[in-house]
Image (cartoon, coloured by chain):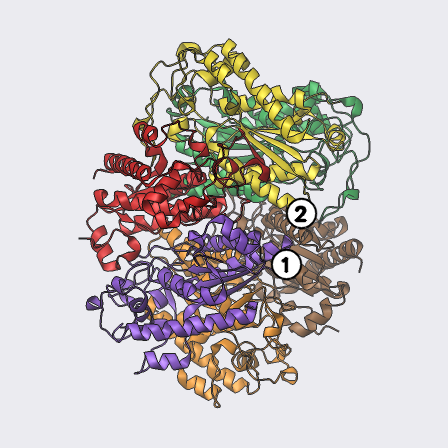
Chain colours: A green, B brown, C yellow, D orange, E red, F purple
Amino acid sequence: MLTTRQLEDLDAHSYQDYTSTGHGLVLLPTGATEQHGPHMPLGVDAMLARAVATAAAEDLDALVAPALSYGYKSQPRSGGGNHRPGTTSLSAQTLILQVRDVALEFFRHGIRRLVVINGHFENYQFLYEGADLAVREARAAGLDDSRVVLLSYWDFVDDRTLEAVFPEGFHGWDVEHGGVLETSLMLRLHPEKVDMSRAPSHPPAQLTPYDVLPEDPARTPSSGCLSSPAGATAERGELLLNAVRDGIVRAVSSEFGK
Amino acid sequence: MLTTRQLEDLDAHSYQDYTSTGHGLVLLPTGATEQHGPHMPLGVDAMLARAVATAAAEDLDALVAPALSYGYKSQPRSGGGNHRPGTTSLSAQTLILQVRDVALEFFRHGIRRLVVINGHFENYQFLYEGADLAVREARAAGLDDSRVVLLSYWDFVDDRTLEAVFPEGFHGWDVEHGGVLETSLMLRLHPEKVDMSRAPSHPPAQLTPYDVLPEDPARTPSSGCLSSPAGATAERGELLLNAVRDGIVRAVSSEFGK
Amino acid sequence: MLTTRQLEDLDAHSYQDYTSTGHGLVLLPTGATEQHGPHMPLGVDAMLARAVATAAAEDLDALVAPALSYGYKSQPRSGGGNHRPGTTSLSAQTLILQVRDVALEFFRHGIRRLVVINGHFENYQFLYEGADLAVREARAAGLDDSRVVLLSYWDFVDDRTLEAVFPEGFHGWDVEHGGVLETSLMLRLHPEKVDMSRAPSHPPAQLTPYDVLPEDPARTPSSGCLSSPAGATAERGELLLNAVRDGIVRAVSSEFGK
Amino acid sequence: MLTTRQLEDLDAHSYQDYTSTGHGLVLLPTGATEQHGPHMPLGVDAMLARAVATAAAEDLDALVAPALSYGYKSQPRSGGGNHRPGTTSLSAQTLILQVRDVALEFFRHGIRRLVVINGHFENYQFLYEGADLAVREARAAGLDDSRVVLLSYWDFVDDRTLEAVFPEGFHGWDVEHGGVLETSLMLRLHPEKVDMSRAPSHPPAQLTPYDVLPEDPARTPSSGCLSSPAGATAERGELLLNAVRDGIVRAVSSEFGK
Amino acid sequence: MLTTRQLEDLDAHSYQDYTSTGHGLVLLPTGATEQHGPHMPLGVDAMLARAVATAAAEDLDALVAPALSYGYKSQPRSGGGNHRPGTTSLSAQTLILQVRDVALEFFRHGIRRLVVINGHFENYQFLYEGADLAVREARAAGLDDSRVVLLSYWDFVDDRTLEAVFPEGFHGWDVEHGGVLETSLMLRLHPEKVDMSRAPSHPPAQLTPYDVLPEDPARTPSSGCLSSPAGATAERGELLLNAVRDGIVRAVSSEFGK
Amino acid sequence: MLTTRQLEDLDAHSYQDYTSTGHGLVLLPTGATEQHGPHMPLGVDAMLARAVATAAAEDLDALVAPALSYGYKSQPRSGGGNHRPGTTSLSAQTLILQVRDVALEFFRHGIRRLVVINGHFENYQFLYEGADLAVREARAAGLDDSRVVLLSYWDFVDDRTLEAVFPEGFHGWDVEHGGVLETSLMLRLHPEKVDMSRAPSHPPAQLTPYDVLPEDPARTPSSGCLSSPAGATAERGELLLNAVRDGIVRAVSSEFGK
């Protein structure tokens, strides 16, 4: 019987008992250290990925691994751009190797079912590559049943929840950086880390359908948010959290058995 | 006066004349070698990226570099998955380094304006990293005005064109692998390489909001198409090509001057 | 005026104010996810590095960056060996690149003084390489005053404290894995995460003056501790914490000015 | 029955039929984007490697994969040097990884016999390393019969052909950059891409028996050719093409069976 | 019957006879090219590692492989720092890969027992990683009994020898760079390469318990020695050599059988 | 005034005096550990590269750095193949990085003129890449006059010497592995390491104009020599050594000034 869902808080002997059942399931949250406007802290992406993982862990009888706190370079069309103060990112190869190494270690422990829960849009393809390299290497070493589910938590927000959270219309995922979705979840999960009095109010950023390198700082709002967080509430955060948790639990159970 | 827009067909002395103006602009098409159903060839992505680049080159007084013919691993949610026969992919690091190396060479030649024209969804983040590494390295070496525009050509299909091409409703970009968009463009550009008699007819794939590794072959249609190409015509291809060419010319001119 | 010492809890605008003074100082804790016996959790190394950094941050007017939660492979002569359940490690190249990337980002922000606070013995040389690569690259890019102090926190335990904590004699740093030092610090800082009723009692491990690969599991105690934590108390943890904090504050102030 | 020898023009279902016989053979042309004097285009090396592969494919019942259009850095003693305008090269690691990745994909498809047909002198050792890494990795993964033949096409020009093509004496392979051999082949295969009116006329370059880095531009002829293409004709190109095609067909048949 | 213990002096046919017994044992010395004060040459670390290996080879019926003559960057707290003239070092990744490659080759030859004998303090962790990668890769390839012993020779100096060599008290291993230990061994093994008339005389360096990057040249004695070599004699070198040789022979015999 | 030409035998203070003149010149020998038939040792390539460097050092007032004793994988067409017992090789990336690192260190010391003297055919392209990376990086760091000459020693054997050494006709450089050239040089330089009574006698190997991977052991003579060393004498070695030394001295003086 586990006394905690956080891997970092578990002792090794209890962990061994858990893995020795052969049904171990580990959730790996991946975030970023990235500006999220004047009203939210730099750690939002890792905090939300960790919170979502923790929310899903009980139903899945899973453990939550320490989050990857640094993510891939922020891009102007999803996070405001990597030139912004406070955004502290990894290059592609570093992030890929980190996921590969950590996944291989869990496979070595006897964990055969790993779920990577992404909280930073820009990470996804690099997490995919890391997971793919790990699965190939594990299978080459004879661990044939090693598997990974990879997901970004917001992809589990269903249409009904979206309508409830954005009653006046959803502007699209691309401008949801520092906006209503993330702010509502933070108000629900870490209200003390949000200062709504500093929340900016401006129309959604007009994003180009392409990227320019080096980034042009003039291209994204000076607030650092791609849309206004006005309308964010803890209640809406609760709706979002429930939708995401339930969706992930259903998906993982369906893939891996429960 | 250039006699060709294809860099590979140009001699070095003429290229030097072109670059010595200081206004050189190179378009780098990036594709993949990837299954596109029974009715289209493996080279679709590179062919379309090359054709789009060539279409835009005249208006931009640009050169088209040899395409990168191999791309990142095909993923089930955008290309059917990398397990399929014929799909011949690069790992992330290889693709990143290739873009970095080629971009740095053009900067060394005196080209300061590079446009990467992507034709394979899965490539995008790795092209971004390659371009970012090249721009950083070029600037560290004192080439301070080296710039890259990175785009995927389908992001320039405007709403009006979309309605004309999909009069019965658009199923979304995610299932547009081997479907009406790519097939129409191929019918317009390389009709001899399309065999509509072999085009599959099935409903759009039901994609999960997550990935599983290793891939589950049962997850995507056996045809290899994520939606049916029924309805594809050369005329629709013409509409798409015009929209994409015009959009890219406008965007690049706006960023780089003409 | 900073409202928190934790970078992840700070918003980007406040961070920019902080860095714009030109006197910014960032502390980067580095730990591991590694077995620490039956009485302590897997996250001990990161927890202690983070706690030490936080303790020193106020006096140094510094920020504490998110900890690197995964470290280099545990070795039998300092951590029991990497074959043990729960030990979840990175390969050398991954850890090196992670430190390099993160350090370069802080330099880009205008931070010129970075302190890496190590909590996992095996990390040290890889942290050194990562810091060295970052400093070289920063200076090649013209950031000539970028500097790093690298330390392992236990190297600041002075002789007087050592005598107070080990009144019956110190067995040496090499067997201090899961022993009195780490356990005392955890009892002082996170008592709810320690279960002294499960603390093993056995003589210090007899370590060989060499390593064998692959590791021989028979070589280290089955408890996972290299010496017994008997004698660990929160009071001794307080002595240790004070000595380490004071020593680090003095050293960093002396190197970097205050 | 294949309708084309070009892999990029083949659909995936036909490719699967081809590979499922177990006798699939793929030819991978590797070239460069490199200056070839004022009379020939930058793409000569890839064009010739592709043409040679296509010429041999019918007799071998083989498929021709998309060429690698970029090659290793041009060197003064074989290609004039990498400092020249238009020469667009890859670093060693990039080229090695590209060959490794592509070869491994063909092995995964069930292709066990791969022929790398090189058209750029400087590539050879890096192609060897890429092929060696792929074969080792394939065999470690249980694909024990995966094999590669690696060749440079000009090594199949026999003495009789050499005498016919160079009736006044052969100056050696090292100065055959942009000279009679490549120009004759281009006149035979792509006459519209050659402008003999711009062909330079100068004695063969006097090459040193060593390299200097960085390259000394004064060391090679300003034309970019290491010997004069005077004497190149389509007829001589026909002789060369026949010799090379026949030699490669014989060698590959002898190694792999036909 | 081997005619030499030096692998480089052995012919391949005799080597094959040796490995075919299945009991082959190879000793790989690893050193550095690093300043060792005004009285000793730059090659001390490789010379001593090679000499120790050669001394132990006879008793172990082992071969001595060519030494790795370049090592990891010298650090101020163990070697004076990498900024010093003459110190010629490798980066971490280079050293790691070198050990991995060489170890894998010996495993391929049928050697299953490899001893890495380190003579440069800073190398150790990188040798460990290289050996770990090689052992993992060898075992993944089915060479399940491949093993490595890794050691630094000075860890085999026993207390009795230490007392005899430092009758007035030992200052600690950290300041033993260019001091009595290395100088005594050199006087015993290569007296013609030592010039005691140039030996510096100063108190041991006061080392900080942390590192600073970039290095501060003022931090270590201008002689390049971290303690004075005064007191070094060939007789003390003989004591040290005997202790080290005997300790290594015992340890290796115990691990690997003799 | 230098007391030795061997860098490893020089003390750091004398080295600093030497480099401080600004005219320092370092010769870096690169070899291999590779079978050379039953009559010669595995270390031939490094021994000869070192001997040639030493012979040239006096006239050039140069220092000889420690040789790189391990080289790139032996290939069947120049060294018999890497499958042979005793051949102990590096992968491409390892060798490239090693040359890059070492060259950069010499540049850092103030050495601006480096000569890489190659003794193993297969190394050349990887040495080129390593030198190219180092020169680029050095120049990016402002060391604009850093230069490398790269050569293989046998390329300095002139025609007259060739006729004298092979009075009955030269079979070509490709079969000169373990043959008259290397054996004569060894008889001149290290006669005690050659056993002519074990020298094989067989016709030159019939080499194919292509490579096959994995290597086919049946393809090269079982002796390991690609041609017979019969006819090798110390006198012919003397002729070869003189030709090579004189040629290198002339070339380096001409490039670098003397």
Say which quarter of the image contains residue A128.
Answer: top right
- Taking depth in this image into account, of F204 and C209 the one nearest to the observer is C209
Q: Are marks 1 and 2 on the same chain?
A: no
Numbered disc 1: secondary structure: loop
**Real-space Cα separation, disc 1 to disc 2, in angstroms:** 16 Å
- Counting other residues with Cα less than 10 Å from the Cα at mark 2, is it few (<14), some (14-19), or many (20 or more)? some
Q: Nearer the viewer, mark 1 or mark 2?
A: 1
Q: What is the number of the mark on residue F144?
A: 1
Image point (43%, 64%), residue name: F53
Q: Which mark is residue C141?
A: 2
Task: Examine the rendered structure and indicate whether residue A81 appears above or below residue C121.
Answer: below
Instruction: State left or right for residue F232 relative to residue D102.
Output: left
**Label 1: few (<14), some or many (≥20) within 10 Å?**
some
Count of number-bearing discs: 2
Image quarter where the C terminus of chain B lies is bottom right
Judging depth in this view, the residue of D82 and B80 nearest the camera is: D82
Under circle 2, the secondary element is loop
Q: Relative to residue D90, is residue C59 drawn left or right?
A: right
Q: Which residue occupies the extreme right position in the image?
A: A202
Picture quadrant where residue E254 is located? top left
